[in-house]
Amino acid sequence: MTIDKIVNIKNFSVLTVNGVEYSLDSDSIVLFRLKQGEEIDDNTLAALISESEKISCRKYLYSQIDRYSKTEKGYRDKLKEKGYRHDAITYAIACAKQKGYIDDKAFAERYYEKNKNKKGINRIFIELKNKGVAKENLEFILSSDENPETALSIAEKFMKKRQLTDAERLKLMRHLAQKGFSYDTVIKAVNVIFSEKNI
């Protein structure tokens, strides 16, 4: 097969082989040192297409990393949505992890610091697990001390315009539990709100 022409258009190139056009990442053309008029066999063309997708996938991933902070699973899901194949995604993720661009433990630590004054430890743990963070990267959360002041602050806000009734007590307990606070922390916060001096 003969390379009829190579047309460079911004970040990609159009390679024409025997009248068939292929849109490829420009870096892959440079990597394979292709020139118009040269011969190219099926295996080389297949390798070129595969390499182009890997490079394109890596570039897209890096652009996402610059814009959004996600876990490895989050980035993988995004790349799948864009239609990249498994081997291209695996390659791109490996490149990013090697450079330290993707670090699930660091993500978990940032997420915890951002949310520890809004949610309970159990809720944060479950949310991070659902985001694909491995359990070994979440052990620090389970060993962290839960801040009862956070639960109390949320409880006070919840009860601001509510009556101190048994029904509202149950609603408050459910609310705090849904926020991920432990049973002991929930009970302490509820007892403070419903203490005798507040009735």
Image (spheres, rainbow, N blue to C red):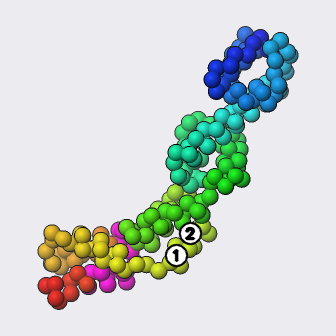
Q: Which mark is residue 53?
A: none
Task: Look at the picture and state if 56 lies above or below 68.
Answer: above
Provide the residue designation for mark 1.
Answer: 142
Provide the residue designation for mark 2.
Answer: 138
Q: Is residue 48 left or right of residue 156?
A: right
Residue at 83 percent across and 12 percent down: it is 37
Q: Is residue 60 left or right of residue 172?
A: right
Under circle 1, the secondary element is: helix
Q: Look at the numbered discs 1 and 2 and tell me whether their residues touch, using CB distance below 8 Å.
A: yes
Q: Quadrant of residue 83?
A: top right
Q: CA distance from mark 1 to mark 2?
A: 7 Å
Task: Look at the picture and state if 14 lies above or below 68.
Answer: above
Q: Give the main secondary structure, helix, strand or loop, of the magenta stretch.
A: helix
Labels in figure, total = 2
Point out residue 115 in the picture as x, y percentages from the top left corner.
43, 65
Q: Is residue 185 magenta?
A: yes
Point out residue 59 in the picture as x, y percentages from the top left corner.
64, 38
Point out residue 27 in the picture as x, y percentages from the top left corner.
73, 30
Residue type marked 2: Leu
Q: Is residue 182 left or right of residue 77?
A: left
Q: Which residues are magenta?
A: 177-191
Residue at 75 percent across and 29 percent down: it is 28
- Answer few, some or many: residues within 10 Å of disc 2's Cα (few below 14, many 20 plus, some between 14 and 19): many
Task: Choose between 2 and 152: the one closer to the eye.
Answer: 152
Figure quadrant of the C terminus: bottom left
Residue type marked 1: Leu
